[in-house]
Amino acid sequence: MLWTLATPGLMFSCVKDVYPREPEFQNTMQAELSAEPGAAQPNIQVKSGLQRVVFGNEDGSQLLIVGANDISAHGLAPYEGWESLLNRLVNGLELLRDHLKRPEFTTLGVRYINRVVIPEPQFRFEDYLTLGFVGPPGLPPNVQSFFDRIETVYPDGRTRVAFTWATTEAEPGTAAFVLDFDFNMNCAEGEVLSVTQVREGLQELKQKETAAFESMLQDSLRETFREVH
């Protein structure tokens, strides 16, 4: 995409019927890690990345974010449902077709971030999740805080999932943690996807996300999530 100062305004004219809020701008950040021979610690530099423009509906719960190399649809609480989210992304692609002059989609992604609230300040994982956390002998079993991240690759070699879960702030007398599923599918080299193929690829990622998510919930949490997931 040829990104100029006029680009956000031109795109807004295409999507304002769906996203009437005044567009906002979002600067991405890029971290570079390097190490000099013999250095005691690596050198980390954080630089400003490419700018993206955020289009939103009237209450800001539905967003379409567009950058020079990417486009994504986001839904905030209350959750609108998968079909609505997918349709908004596909409709955004179609509305901005003339401005998205780079047709090669190299990566498709689906990400869900869920906040789980436990009605007690300490808890055992096995009471709520099929995931386990086993500490060394001598440590008490009740967990108050944790952070863990796992990245795995599916047999097709193109699909990856990064799963992060960690405790977060909670109201007194309760505990809370975040379940973050981030699925990505790399397109084959030289492959150019149509909008229909983008939709099909995202549907496939959604099926993987649902299967992974359902497999980790105990019954005590499953019904609660089905109401909003």
Image: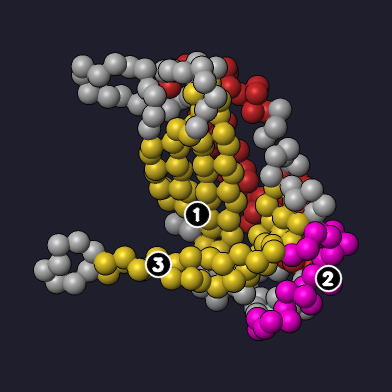
Q: Which residue is mark 1?
A: 159
Q: Which residue is mark 2?
A: 14
Image mark count: 3
Q: Which mark is residue 46?
A: 3
- Dot placed on the residue nearer the N-terminal end, 1 or 2: 2
The C terminus: image quadrant: top right
In the image: residue 224, left or right of residue 124: right
Please tell me which residue is depicted at 21% across the width and 18% down the height of the picture. 137
SS state under label 3:
strand
Please tell me which residue is depicted at 59% across the width and 44% down the height of the picture. 112
SS state under label 2:
helix
> Which residue extends farthest front?
172
For badge 2, the amino acid type reads Cys
For badge 3, the amino acid type reads Val
Please tell me which residue is depicted at 54% across the width and 58% down the height of the picture. 185
In the image: residue 75, left or right of residue 120: right
Measured Cα–Cα span from mark 3 to mark 1: 28 Å
Mark 1 Cα within 10 Å, few/some/many (few <14, many 20+)? some
Residue 42 occupies quadrant: bottom left
Q: Which residues are magenta?
A: 2-23
Measured Cα–Cα span from mark 2 to mark 3: 34 Å
What colour-coding does the image apply? secondary structure
Residue nearest the viewer, comparing 119 with 151: 119
Q: Is residue 154 visible?
A: no
Q: Is residue 125 visible?
A: yes
Q: Whole-percent x and y of residue 94? A: 79, 68
Q: Is residue 168 above or below residue 106?
A: above
SS state under label 1:
strand
C-beta proximity under 8 Å, tags 3 and 1: no
